[in-house]
Amino acid sequence: MADFHARYFSQALTRSVSFYVYLPLDADRNANPEQFARPPKTVLLLHGYTGDAASWKLDTPIYSLAAKYNLALIMPDGENSFYLDGEATGRQYGTFVGKELPDFAHRAFGLSGNREDNFVVGISMGGFGAVHTGLAYPDAFAKIAAFSPALIERRVAAMRPETAPDGVANYEYYSLMFGQPEALAESRNSPETLVKELMQAGKPLPGLFLTIGTEDFLYEPNQEFRRFLTEQNVPFHYEEGPGTHSGEFWNARLEPAIRWMLDLPEQG
């Protein structure tokens, strides 16, 4: 298994950071030769709330799928940042995952920096991060796949200092991650704002794959975003089915999402 644990000094976070990389160097090329007739595509994988850089490799079948479909994987540690740029020095997490880290990994590991060869994928908080990152850097990523994304910007925008903690975090946390809630609706921390900006500028949006379980506690925020995309005439691929906010649901939909990213037909 060509699995690397790399480290470098991040200007965006003003400290040394580490991340994992998987390269399909030792994969069985004869098992899926059509996928190995091209250079590997690169997938940036963003973990969820309370996760870390190792979450994807430990909790999902992504390595076996990467070997099957000739994918290079980049797995950073986003802490609990929602992958957004903060105002404080050393909190430029959006810049870190959207530009700095991919640029470094492309150079260090000889990966393509072309838009069509790069995808961003995330689960839960990382699903929000994938949607936001792909929209904030549309020239860097061709496609986005988000599993049960925490598209909670409308909920956060309605919060005030007296708002009680929601079972995940408190008002102070959300204010630190998203900025002042009352300004969030028009902020570039909102994926909806980024969609509107790109459409007004006439720029192409990355392809978007969304999936969530019907019993997931984030189901309604996803429906709000789905309705928004429909109102804006933004094309997207959407899947739902019975399931909660769980690895069982996400892992079952990981290969279909990869096949969608690679423009392969759905499996029978």
Image (cartoon, rainbow, N blue to C red):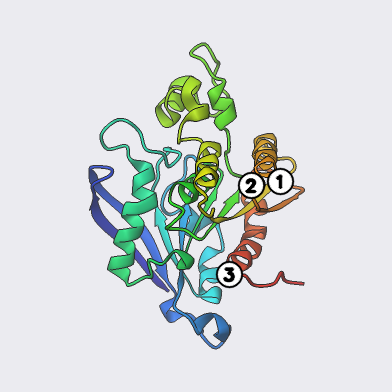
Q: Circle 1 is placed at which residue position?
A: 213
The answer to whether residue 70 shows anywhere in this view is yes
Q: Which of pointers 1 and 2 lies earlier in the amino acid sequence? A: 1
Q: Circle 3 is placed at which residue position?
A: 262
Q: Which amino acid does label 3 sit on?
A: Leu
Viewer-nearest of labels 3 and 2? 3
- As displayed, is residue 132 above or below residue 239? above
Distance between the alpha carbons at the discs numbered 3 and 2: 25 Å
**Residue placed at 32% from the left, 72% from the top?**
110
Q: How crowded is mark 1: few (under 14 residues within 10 Å), some or many (20 or more)?
A: many
Q: What residue type is labelled 2?
A: Ser
Q: Residues within 10 Å of mark 3 (few under 14, many from 20)?
A: some
Distance between the alpha carbons at the discs numbered 1 and 2: 9 Å
The answer to whether residue 126 shows anywhere in this view is no
Confirm or deny contact between disc 1 and disc 3 (CB under 8 A).
no
Q: Circle 2 is placed at which residue position?
A: 246
Viewer-nearest of labels 1 and 2? 1
Q: In which quarter of the image is the N terminus?
A: bottom left
- As displayed, is residue 267 above or below residue 32? above
Along the line of sight, the residue nearer the viewer: 87 or 231: 231
**Residue placed at 40% from the left, 45% from the top?**
78
Q: Which of pointers 1 and 3 lies earlier in the amino acid sequence? A: 1
Disc 1 is placed on an element classified as: strand
Confirm or deny contact between disc 1 and disc 2 (CB under 8 A).
yes
